Image: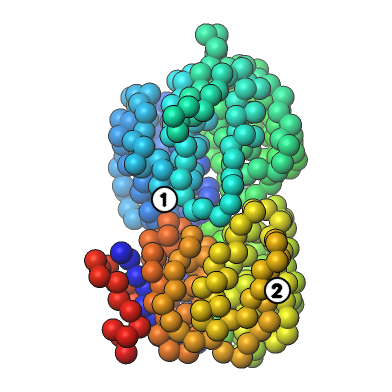
């Protein structure tokens, strides 16, 4: 078991550099299957989800060279259309991008149903709808998704997504890049990592237009050649450190960001009383007083991101007044509120809304990281709380945050990582 042990009460001061975007990296790495040459990819986050995908690609025969902690060279020219090990696929949600990439490259995909964080039903019906619009036959059997292109290959099609889906938008793009004709995807998601995937594919020779808008057009090409690409900074990692600085207090400069991607987070923290200053590629968050209440409803980009919902809820947990958080994307993303309640927060969940009555202080105790972003929220709560907080199942956090212990320690946080067969309790650390 991986645990984080936090001594709360220390303000955060200094600077922190944001890593490459997790949600872009986990789509771009499978996309290398479509490229016939070498891909040099920079600003790749060193996180467990990325390491799992690299293990899957390596198992398929990809040549992978690490040129530095965050730079990779990948050559998929000689990969084979092998079924990825189920024990790897089921540990990561983004493994479903292998379906689109393998279907586009080989005309066949056989991929286990994805795993990752569990916060409600997240079907892949819109992905399948898109593949079928390109002519593929798709069935789900025995815990696997099996997709086959017709004998004459995939062809361009017209897809209208019934719901705005990031995963489906990206997966259909992957499948369509090498097929004949034009594919039109309507009601697309607009998140920055969708634009990043399109930019990567275009840098390799694809012809994709409209990424970041409601309609994406993919003109099929015969082949993608190699090239170099740098992944964008992680919007959610940046937002998490912004929320931490606002909730815990202090003065933190968050570097290597695209401020435009953070507009909705910046606006909300300013509304709650934090001082936020924007620079060309950095944001400073200062907070010296108790925050004020606010309301948040998560929505697809450019709305407030669902992946920031637990972190902003911690800011509200010790704010003055009563705040409302409404989840507009997933069905069940409030499991972490029970853990906040153990720390003394006052949170009541009614359907898709959490009612948070701010308390002056929270206290440390043993809590559980329910998923990736809930785990990040527990870290912020532990930094805010009086006494010692121990977070169990912290491996979830490491799915999406590179060197979170080192980065927070450099900001003055008192946090350490423990690997143990016998879980540490608050009694063990006094």
The residue depicted at 32 percent of the width and 66 percent of the height is 2
Local packing at callout 1 (Cα closer than 10 Å; few below 14, some 14-19, many 20+) is many
> Which image quarter: residue 37?
top left
The residue depicted at 66 percent of the width and 84 percent of the height is 358
In-image side of 352 versus 220 (left or right): right
Closer-to-camera residue (155/338): 338
Indicate the position of residue 168 as horizontal and vertical percent values. Answer: 61, 37
Q: Is residue 125 above or below residue 315?
A: above
Q: Is residue 207 above or below residue 200?
A: above
Residue at the extreme top of the image, as rendered: 151
> Which image quarter: residue 79?
top left
Counting the numbered discs, the total is 2
The residue depicted at 51 percent of the width and 73 percent of the height is 339
Indicate the position of residue 154 as horizontal and vertical percent values. Answer: 58, 17
In-image side of 30 versus 169 (left or right): left
Give the position of the N terminus as an image quadrant: bottom left
Q: Are marks 1 and 2 in contact (CB under 8 Å)?
A: no
Closer-to-camera residue (328/101): 328
First in sequence: mark 1 or mark 2?
1
Q: CA distance from mark 1 to mark 2?
A: 32 Å
Q: Which mark is residue 49?
A: 1
Closer-to-camera residue (278/360): 360
Give the position of the C terminus as an image quadrant: bottom left
Indicate the position of residue 258 as horizontal and vertical percent values. Answer: 61, 60
Residue assigned mark 2: 355
Indicate the position of residue 320 as horizontal and vertical percent values. Answer: 70, 87
The local secondary structure at tag 1 comes to helix
In-image side of 166 versus 47 (left or right): right
Whether residue 238 appears in this view of the structure is: no
Local packing at callout 2 (Cα closer than 10 Å; few below 14, some 14-19, many 20+) is some
The local secondary structure at tag 2 comes to strand
Q: How is the image coloured?
A: rainbow
């Amino acid at each position: 078991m991986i645990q984080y042990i936090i001594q709360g009460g220390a303000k955060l001061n200094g600077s922190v550099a944001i890593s490459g975007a997790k949600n872009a990296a986990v789509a771009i790495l499978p996309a290398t299957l479509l490229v016939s040459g070498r891909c040099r990819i920079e600003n790749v986050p060193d996180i467990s989800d990325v390491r799992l995908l690299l293990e899957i690609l390596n198992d398929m025969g990809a040549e992978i060279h690490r040129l530095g902690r965050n730079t990779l060279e990948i050559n998929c020219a000689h990969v084979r259309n092998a079924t990825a090990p189920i024990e790897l696929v089921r540990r990561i949600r983004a493994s479903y991008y292998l379906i689109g990439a393998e279907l586009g490259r080989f005309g066949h995909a056989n991929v286990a149903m994805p795993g990752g964080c569990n916060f409600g039903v997240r079907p892949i019906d819109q992905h399948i709808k898109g593949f079928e619009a390109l002519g593929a036959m798709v069935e789900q059997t025995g815990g696997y998704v099996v997709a086959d292109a017709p004998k004459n290959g995939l062809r361009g099609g017209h897809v209208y997504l019934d719901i705005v889906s990031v995963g489906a938008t990206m997966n259909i793009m992957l499948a369509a890049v090498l097929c004949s004709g034009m594919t039109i995807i309507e009601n697309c998601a607009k998140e920055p990592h969708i634009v990043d995937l399109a930019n990567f594919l275009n840098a390799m020779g694809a012809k994709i237009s409209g990424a970041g808008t409601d309609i994406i057009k993919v003109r099929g090409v015969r082949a993608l050649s190699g090239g170099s690409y740098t992944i964008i900074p992680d919007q959610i990692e940046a937002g998490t450190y912004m929320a931490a600085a606002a909730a815990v207090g202090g003065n933190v400069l968050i570097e290597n960001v695209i401020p435009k991607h953070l507009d909705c987070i910046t606006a909300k923290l300013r509304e709650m009383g934090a001082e936020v200053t924007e620079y060309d590629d950095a944001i400073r968050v200062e907070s010296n007083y108790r925050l004020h209440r606010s309301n948040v409803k998560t929505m697809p980009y450019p709305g407030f991101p669902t992946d920031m919902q637990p972190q902003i809820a911690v800011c509200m947990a010790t704010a003055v007044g009563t705040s409302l958080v409404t989840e507009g994307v997933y069905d069940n993303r409030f499991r972490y509120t029970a853990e906040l309640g153990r720390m003394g927060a006052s949170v009541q969940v009614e359907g898709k809304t959490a009612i948070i009555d701010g308390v002056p202080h929270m206290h440390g105790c043993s809590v559980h990281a329910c998923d990736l972003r809930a785990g990040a929220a527990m870290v912020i709560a532990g930094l805010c709380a009086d006494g010692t907080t121990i977070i169990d199942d912290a491996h979830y956090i490491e799915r999406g945050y590179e060197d979170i212990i080192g980065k927070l320690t450099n900001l003055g946080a008192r946090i350490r990582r423990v690997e143990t067969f016998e879980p540490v309790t608050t009694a063990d650390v006094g």
